[in-house]
Amino acid sequence: MELVRQDLGKAAVMLLGFVVMSLGVALLMNSQMGLFPWGVLHEGLSEATLLTFGQVTSYLGFVILLFSVVVFKTNIGPGTILNILLVGPIIDLFDLIIQLPNDGLFIKMIFFIVGLILMSLGKALYISTKLGAGPRDGLFVGVSRTLKIEVKYIKPLIEVIVLFIGYLLGGLVGVGTIITMLLSGYMVQMFFKLFKFESRTDRQRNLVEYFRYRKSA
């Protein structure tokens, strides 16, 4: 029970991270300056399937998680499950609320900059709770562990492939796409330092731990 109580105390921070990240994604979408690689794929699949951006985010997240668990034996934390269930609907909600004023490039740049900051902040916030990373992060780690290649090399390789597929499906690629690919990783690391989270050593929660803890209690 103590382990569950500890993690429940972090849940509010994790949920805040989901909301902040989702708001950032919605602002990036509305800036029309180009999405991050996974966003390009989500938008491309949305165009091809008539699903919303958020629905694609959730469904694809589930598929990626299932693949990662079966192939790479990826750990699943409560945050991993809640990421799949909540982030997509929250993005869709913000996308309905936010409407970009038709005031030219300056407003688009403001939307983009604020969106990039919030997306990076929100991601760092929920990961730093150590309740379980998102399914796409688990994929990076799984491929890295299997191929014995560092994540810093695997992540951009996967993102280039994802970007290319998304572009072919009609996802929005622009100067903002290049900027997010170059800066978002550094920004997340910067926020990690703010939250005193060390991505190389701090371990994410695994759902199995709750059952082991109950047996040993």
Image (tube, rainbow, N blue to C red):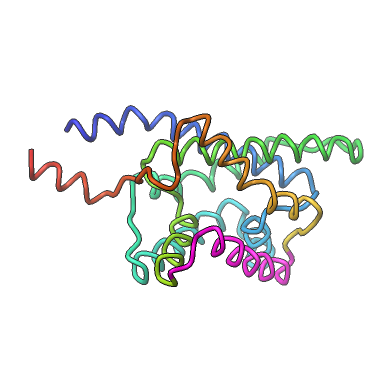
Q: Is residue 56 above or below residue 29?
A: below
Residue located 77% across and 59% down the image: 173
Return the residue nearer the eye: 176 or 193: 193
Side (left or right) of 48 relative to 190: right
Q: Is residue 28 above or below residue 169?
A: above
Return the residue nearer the eye: 182 or 107: 182
Q: Is residue 162 magenta?
A: yes
Residue 144 image position (x, y, % from top left)? 45, 65
Residue 164 image position (x, y, % from top left)? 69, 69
Check the image and name the residue furthest to the right: 104
Q: Is residue 196 above or below residue 181?
A: above
Residue 73 image position (x, y, % from top left)? 32, 65
Q: Is residue 84 above or below residue 165?
A: above
The stretch of residues the image draws in magenta is 148-170
Residue located 48% across and 55% down the image: 137
Residue located 16% across and 33% down the image: 1
Q: Is residue 107 magenta?
A: no
Quadrant in the rendering for residue 107: top right
Could you tell me what secondary structure mostly forms the magenta stretch? helix
Residue 16 image position (x, y, % from top left)? 49, 31
Say which quadrant the C terminus sits in.
top left
Residue located 51% across and 36% down the image: 192
Quadrant in the rendering for residue 105: top right
Side (left or right) of 49 relative to 82: right
Report the label total.
0
